[in-house]
Amino acid sequence: MARIRNLLCLGCAGLCLCATAVRADERRGLQLARRPVTVADTIEMTQWADRSYAAGAPSAGRVGVFSPDRKQFVMLLKKGNLATNTNEFSILLFDAKASSEAKPQVLITMSSSSNREGIKNVKWLGDNETIVFLGENSGDIPQVYSLTVKSRKLTKLTSHPTAIVAYDISRSGDQIVFEAHPPSVKKIDTPEVRRNGLIITGGYPDNILSEDCAIERADRSEQLYVQGPDGVVSHIDTDDFISDWEPLSMAPNGHFGLVSVYRKEVPQEWAEYEDEILRPYLREKRKIGEYSTVPQYMLLDTKKKIFQPFIDAPLSSGATGFAWVNGGQSVVISGTYLPLDVADPEMRRERTRGPFVVEVMLPDRGYLPITSRSLAIREWRSSTATLVLQEPGHDALRLLGYQKLGSVWHEIPQDDSSIRIPLPEVVLEEDLNTPPRLYFVDSDRKQRTLLLDLNPQFRGLALGTVAEFRWKASDGHDMAGGLYLPPDYRPGKRYPLVIQTHGFDKDRFRIDGPFTSAFAAQPLASKGIAVLQVGRSVESGPPTTATNTTEEGPREMAAYEGAIDELDRRGLIDPSRVGLIGFSRTAYKVAYTLTHSKYHFAAATLADGFEGGYVNYVLFQAVDSVWVNGGLPSDDFLQSWLKRSPGFNLDKVIAPVRIEEYAYGSLLGGWEWFSGLSFRDKPVELVWIPFGTHLLVKPWERLVSQQGNVDWFDYWLNGRSDPDPAKRKQYQRWERMRMQLSGGKKDPASSFNHDDHREVAHVAESRSVY
């Protein structure tokens, strides 16, 4: 795929422009051959449907679910369908003796109209002929299904009355453990409340007000069940919090299960563990009935229906994992602390300092420490009786092997063949400018075979070139991110800039950004806008973190300011046309910048995030607001709040602000800025997506957010409007905002005074899902 690759080159100091440029006629030819990237392209992009990968985890070692005999494997893909407002999930079957001519078979496709995955957790049974998965079609409740690969016979294995959100199954398929939503029970619209009202003893307004709504709630614990060979389902009671985002596993023999929970009650002595990240949560004072965020692995005996901890200690904040050993006779856990019930002071001290890798024997739960090194479990190789561990945080994957001799685990030599990755291997390859493709790699034979180009249609798109960009923040610290240039970029021309926040990965192809909410990098680039995806600070020593301190806002503001300075110095951008998008946590950092920076911003978006204000503190008991503003908003810290909190400095906001709030009760989260700016007659709009999730999933809701931001920044930075008649009201709103900026007068710089744009009256509002 020919690109304008010679426009950019990477140097140790960052991104540099080369002296040569593509000839104008060649560039025009490129643009005639390809069309601009749209938000629809990002929504309908085919992707590997893996939760961890979507959240930013690498694909190494996880692509392709092999059958036990490794003769075939399956892969789960997903794509959005804008016509039906569904997400389509497909299981593809590949022959392990792959060739470029061999086409994968589509075993099954399911389309989800909810915020859940249509298919997830695909597994093989021990017969090498049957796959099992959690699936739902549009309008259905998700259940566990099995599918026979040869005959395509689909069998529903569960019939639970509420949505099953996680499961695992024994190798024979006769034991299932699963998590499901609790039944909906009205708590507000009841005769009792009508007569006596409702006593509020805790919780948050957004959750309380949505109690009776038939929507999924992240603050509700899932319920745990076991289904035996006879089909009888047993509910396993627990007071701890269960989330489908945390591990759930069944031993191959079906006798035991592992369930990750967040403890409701945290033993007082756990406060001695020295985990820097976990420690505040081990010591926090919580209200009665509130769950902690302290994780622990629990053992489920599927026969006796007993539920208890594997080890009476918490999991650490990193390198956690597990592997069933010898078919389920024991389990190895990494990243777990050990109990402090030892008399030897030095041994107790060692146990408080860091986590261990431990083997737990079943069913008596006796444990045997393997190592205190910070290693994460990769897998258990039953063929060689080898436990494979890996060092987390390393670019190059380093594997270490351990084998048990008698009652002692020993590390085996690095070159031992038993710890090598089984070959051949399936890999997903991509980079900043190359969309993901699936390859079959046999390093022994030095063969590399293309199995699948996930998005061949992208060859017809004029994608903007992306390169890693490094700069120095205005306070002196070093930063790295990704710079997207318009596909028809011309050296010497200054472009508007949108700064997208919240992370950057130099090894990933990101057509929109790290998340599907608000970000739209390539569609913005297609509008002639340079986009900077901000990553983390680049430091040679231990990382410096300002999170949850009074330096969080200033440090991030300095990063944005430094990027503007450097791009301006290089002649790449017009500093008078810079926009900001903050999402989730970085909504606060953008809010702080808008209220404290002396730099000019032409427009901004705050999307579904914490923004460090007093209303957040009151409504959601946001302790983060206390931390970033220096203390509680009273007495000695009141002045600190008045100085630091964005909500108390809205008079300094100059840029038009778009606020996006997702989920039913989230509307309150954006109200301080919406009300405060409206009261001051400053341009602001609030877009509420009541049935969306924090990471938007449904195609129409993504379109509202992502296309809304493309239109928003194209309007404020380029002075352009979309002539689509469906967007008429949208541009009428924004024209009124422009008049607010000019003191109620028609702004002579408005795009609607230009001959090459249509009048506002002929432009209409964007598509709405509510």
Image: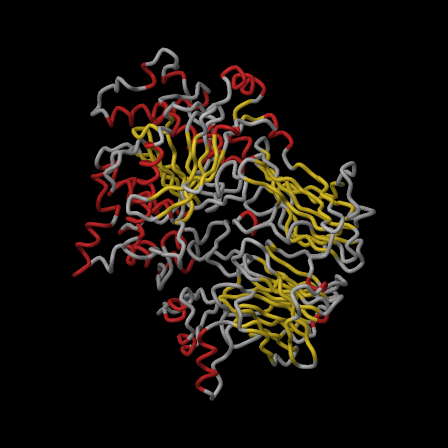
Q: Position of residue 579 (x, y in %)?
A: 35, 34
Q: Position of residue 555 (x, y in %)?
A: 31, 49
Residue 361 sits above or below residue 126 on the image:
below
Q: Residue at x 30, y 47 (%)?
A: 476
Residue 243 sits above or below residue 499 on the image:
below
View extreme (right): residue: 151
Q: Residue at x 78, y 40 (%)?
A: 99
Q: Quadrant of residue 390?
A: bottom right
View extreme (bottom): residue: 343
Q: Looking at the figure, which quarter contains the N terminus?
A: top right
Q: Position of residue 720 (x, y in %)?
A: 38, 21
Of the pair 351 and 494, the residue shown nearer to us: 494
Residue 212 sits above or below residue 430 on the image:
below
User: Total number of numbered labels?
Assistant: 0
Of the pair 504 and 285, the residue shown nearer to us: 504
Residue 450 visible to an observer of this rendering: yes
Residue 308 visible to an observer of this rendering: no
Q: Is residue 16 left or right of residue 357?
A: left
Q: Quadrant of residue 596?
A: top left
Of the pair 565 and 730, the residue shown nearer to us: 565
Q: Is residue 168 left or right of residue 339?
A: right
Q: How is the image coloured?
A: secondary structure
Q: Is residue 592 left or right of residue 457?
A: left
Q: Position of residue 303 (x, y in %)?
A: 69, 74
Q: Residue at x 54, y 17 (%)?
A: 26
